Amino acid sequence: MSDFFLNIVVIGRNESEFLCDSLESAIEAGNYLKSLGYESPRIIYLDGQSTDDSVAIAMEKRIEIYIVDGTPNPARGRQFGLKKSNAKYVFFLDGDTIVNRGWLIKGVQYLENNPDVAGVGGILDWEEWCNGKVLGRKSNYWNVRHNEEKVVDGVGGTFLYHYEVLDKVGGWNTTLACNEEFELHLRIAHAGYSLRRISVPMATHRDNKTNSAKTFLQRHILNSTIFIPSVIIRRAPKSLPVLKLLFYRYWLYLLHPLAILGISTFILLYFQAQSVKWIIFGILTAIFLFIGHYFYKGKGFRRSIISAITMNFFSLGWIIGLFVRWPNKE
């Protein structure tokens, strides 16, 4: 039997710039839930071995604090938080994200009325920060278009779950340095549950922008995380709901290298045959490739251009990973 109705699990590592606001928002949301007659939620902070004053900030808020052992990553932090939880529902919140005061009651009520739904999210706004200033904002980052729409892609770190379902499927895979939410989603779908988003303001994520191309390459390209999608595909449960999610997530990864090869071939044929039809065909192929990125990401022109460039690396990584063992432990 659960001791609490709701736990709020906050994870963070070196988030001192935003952590105080994040924890205060969790406390305020919990107090609001209590004012409506619900039990006051238990708040837990999981720290990924921060080297700044994140732990001191959390101590000032007088909440439970645990230091996550092992190599820090989001999956390890959330799984640690899941093991420490003792509630019917668990709301996971990133340490750089501000939860909307009224979100918890809306999310809990939705799960109470929909026992076949394992977890629910709402509208997430996005802020880009640099040197303590907001560079830009984007509303509805996950592009929620319909109330109660099924999640078919990633869910992000801020989400409300049924504890029982998470426990049933084993929680997060702590060996994954990224894409851990999607891998969990596959196991939830295989177990017969769905994840949903409702048209209710949930939170605002604060992204501490780094403009360095070197940092991007080190984090996303020049390390073993480029092979992680192949690990997820290879180890995913075999069922129709899982295959549907995999296709939606990765169809462009397969199409992308084929399209690039086609564009290169048509341009080469143009220079060999001096036939304008080949160069036109190549240009049209490139345009359709960009359109595919635009609708796949749904985030605007700039994000689509970046996606079209970086996916060359990601496509190569996961295709190689399907045939070659991932260099890290699985």
Image (tube, rainbow, N blue to C red):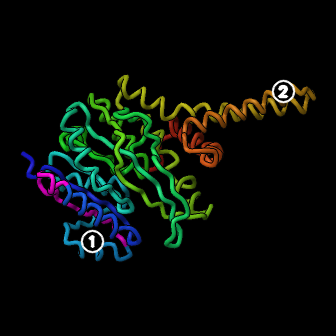
Question: With 141 as the anchor, is 280 left or right in this view?
Answer: right
In the rendered image, residue 42 lying in the magenta stretch gets the answer yes
Pick the residue in front: 107 or 274: 107
Q: Secondary structure at mark 2?
A: helix
Question: With 180 as the anchor, is 109 left or right in this view?
Answer: left
The image shows residue 51, relative to residue 164, as above or below, that is below
Task: Give the residue at x 51% y 34%.
Answer: 250
The image shows residue 85, relative to residue 271, as above or below, that is below
Q: Residue 199 at what x, y percent from top left?
A: 36, 40
Give the amino acid at mark 1.
Answer: Ala
Q: Mark 1 — residue?
A: 58
Q: Quadrant of residue 255?
A: top right
Packing grade of label 2 (10 A; few <14, some 14-19, many >=20) is many
Query: How far apart are the two marked residues, 2 and 1, measured between alpha carbons?
Result: 62 Å
The image shows residue 240, relative to residue 71, as above or below, that is above
State which quarter of the image contains the C terminus. Answer: top left
State which quarter of the image contains the N terminus. Answer: top left
Q: Residue 58 at what x, y percent from top left?
A: 27, 71
Q: Mark 2 — residue?
A: 278
Question: With 26 as the anchor, is 235 left or right in this view?
Answer: right
In the rendered image, residue 290 lying in the magenta stretch gets the answer no
**Do the residues under discs 2 and 1 have CB atoms within 8 angstroms?**
no
Task: Give the residue at x 40% y 56%.
Answer: 204
Question: Most extreme residue toward the top, as rendered?
Answer: 240
Question: With 309 as the anchor, is 59 left or right in this view?
Answer: left
Q: Earlier in the sequence, mark 2 or mark 1?
A: 1
**Mark number, residue 208:** none
Pick the residue in front: 153 or 70: 153
Question: Most extreme residue toward the right, as rendered?
Answer: 274
Q: Which residues are drawn in magenta? A: 33-50
Give the amino acid at mark 2.
Answer: Trp
